Image (cartoon, rainbow, N blue to C red):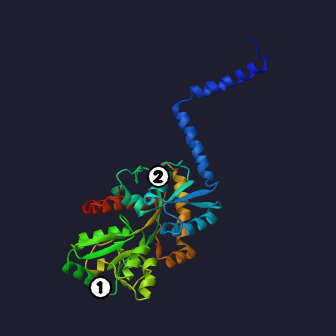
Amino acid sequence: MDCTGFPLFDRQWRTLPVLFAVVLASPQALAQAAVSRSAAAAERYPDRPIRLLVGFAPGGGADTAARPVAHRLAEAVGQQVVVDNRPGSSGNVAAEIVARASPDGYSVLFGTIANFAINPMIYERLTYDPVRDFAPVTLAAAPVNVVVVHPSVQASTMKELIALIRAKPNTFNYGSSGIGGTGHLAGELLSLMGGLAMTHVPYKGGAPAMADLIGGNIPMVITVVPGAMPQVKAGRARLLAVTTGKRSSLLPDIPTVAESGLPGFEANNWYGVVVPAKTPQSIVARLNAELVKVLYSPGLRETYANQGIEAIPGTPAEFTAYIKSEIAKWGKIVKAAGIKAD
């Protein structure tokens, strides 16, 4: 039957070979086509704005660390990098969004140690896996935590403080920005490694904890440099040690806790950049290369130094290994201390 005189039939007959080709195409061919499309998209990356999610409110530590990175990354890649604050559940809300986003490099998480190494241990109903659901891009920065005491405390060094707490078990309190925060866990690690019996007092942020310290209501706080240094310089608090494994370049004259009688002590606070799992490696590599340049740039390092932060970028493989080591380390501390958030 000749149907060429009928336009409708003519169009249908002409499309039949294409339909048969699609139906008969092998799974391998379809997969290869998908890979080709993905590769083409990766080559063009980025060709639209990138969303950088932060799991805390504007003005907080993670936010102030993320914004200069976003600004300089935008200049480097020629596309907008929009900071998207999604506070809630100690950063879990933002992490969950990125874990379920399309793996195309346009939803990026500026995450914290809480997202990857602490929250999975203290939240029983977490809806993302810190290893399975993300592709690490780079470790980014480390806010420096310090141990400060009220001037009335009879200890001028960290070693003297440890001896003082040992001599008076169950009578010494320390404050932090909240349950499960790095200050809290640093205190728990200090208790475990030093055999110290002291009580944690959680606050709703570092500022209220410092206010109680300078008011004489609590003898010790473990907090970040920016929150502590104004009080230290004013003589309202005494700085004894940093919690990092080695001395901080920001405070080279201040000893570590490890130097002060607890060898091996290390409690780092850190930020890192990840994208959804299954993001093409070419996109991960591009983001890593650009972020490493941004984080090593003199302008950003100066900005970070003023915030009490050190830039510490590296490779995706290094960050992957670091996340796993931090999960193992803090999992033991959380279990030993019996910390739960829900």
**Which corner quadrant of the image does residue 242 belong to?**
bottom left
Question: How dense is the environment of label 2, judged by Cα within 10 Å: few (below 14), some, or many (20 and up)?
Answer: many
**Can you tell which of label 2 and label 1 is closer to the viewer?**
1
Residue 38 % position (x, y): 57, 45
Identify the image quadrant of the C terminus.
bottom left
Tell which residue pokes out farthest to the top in this image.
1
Mark linked to residue 153: 1
Structural distance between the alpha carbons of marks 2 and 1: 43 Å
Q: Is residue 315 left or right of residue 218?
A: right
Residue 245 % position (x, y): 34, 74
Q: Earlier in the sequence, mark 2 or mark 1?
A: 2
Question: How dense is the environment of label 1, judged by Cα within 10 Å: few (below 14), some, or many (20 and up)?
Answer: some
The residue nearer to you, when weighing 317 against 96, is 96
Residue on which the image places disc 2: 96
Q: Is residue 96 above or below residue 37?
A: below
Residue 156 % position (x, y): 30, 87
Determine whether label 2 and label 1 are within 8 Å by CB: no
Q: Visible in this render: residue 143? A: yes
User: Image point 40% across, 86% down: which residue?
Assistant: 236
- Kind of residue sitting beneath label 2: Glu
- Kind of residue sitting beneath label 1: Val
User: Image point 53% across, 37% down: which residue?
Assistant: 31
Q: Is residue 262 above or below residue 20?
A: below
SS of the residue at dot 2?
helix
The residue nearer to you, when weighing 148 against 258, is 148
SS of the residue at dot 1?
loop
